[in-house]
């Protein structure tokens, strides 16, 4: 028997900003998060994400960002800008690169939460819930 996604996984009503340049990946993440009850906006790069935050009045409880993004801002730089605007925002980084590679390139802050791509909807849901509850 198929269990609806919102029943099978632990969601919430918080606000999430998703920054991912791969359209299919972004759309899939947004769909999953909305089914789990989250208020979600998304962007394909750092500049779009910051522009949306400044113009929309959206206050994210959590930023879920790819580390490697097109344009002049990587995920770490986007997170620094988001935290300057919304100091209580929780951050989760996504990447297909190893943690060692990201640390060597100074892209992954020490002790930060990271999702390794590809990940399942249950890992996504649990990681987000854990990060949001840690910030409460």
Image (cartoon, rainbow, N blue to C red):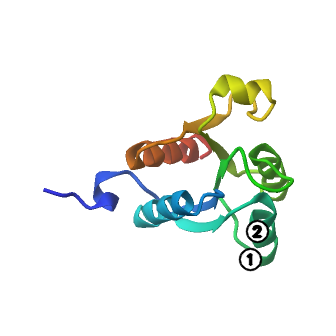
Give above or below for 15 relative to 78. below
Label 2 crowding class (10 Å Cα cut-off): few <14, some 14-19, many 20+? some
> What is the number of the mark on residue 56?
1
Q: Residue furthest left?
A: 1
Residue pictured at 77% horizontal, 35% vertical: 107
Q: Nearer the viewer, residue 31 or 85?
A: 31
Q: Position of residue 127 (x, y in %)?
A: 50, 42
Q: Is residue 110 visible?
A: no
Front in this rendered view, residue 78 or 117: 117
Q: Secondary structure at mark 1?
A: helix
Dividing the picture into quadrants, the one containing residue 40 is bottom right
Give the quadrant of the N terminus: bottom left
Toward the bottom, the furthest residue is 56
Mark 1 surroundings: few (<14), some (14-19) or many (≥20) residues within 10 A: few
- SS for tag 2? helix
Q: Of the numbered discs in the image, which one, if any, rests on residue 53?
A: 2
Identify the residue at image location x=59%, y=38%.
Answer: 96
Snapshot quadrant of residue 52:
bottom right
In this image, 105 relative to 19: left or right?
A: right
> Which residue is at a point 41% across and 49% down the rendered structure image?
121
C-alpha separation, residue under disc 2 versus residue under disc 1: 6 Å
């Amino acid at each position: 028997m198929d269990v609806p996604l919102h029943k099978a996984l632990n969601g919430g009503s918080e606000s999430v900003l998703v920054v991912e340049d791969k359209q299919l990946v972004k759309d899939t993440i947004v769909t999953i998060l909305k089914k789990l009850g989250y208020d979600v906006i998304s962007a394909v790069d750092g500049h779009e994400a910051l522009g949306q935050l400044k113009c929309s009045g959206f206050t994210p409880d959590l930023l879920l960002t790819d580390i490697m993004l097109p344009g002049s801002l990587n995920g770490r730089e986007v997170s620094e800008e988001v935290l300057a605007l919304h100091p209580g925002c929780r951050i989760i980084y996504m990447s297909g690169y190893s943690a060692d590679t990201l640390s060597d390139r100074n892209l992954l802050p020490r002790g930060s939460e990271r999702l390794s791509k590809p990940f399942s909807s249950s890992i996504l849901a649990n990681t987000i819930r854990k990060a949001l509850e840690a910030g409460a």
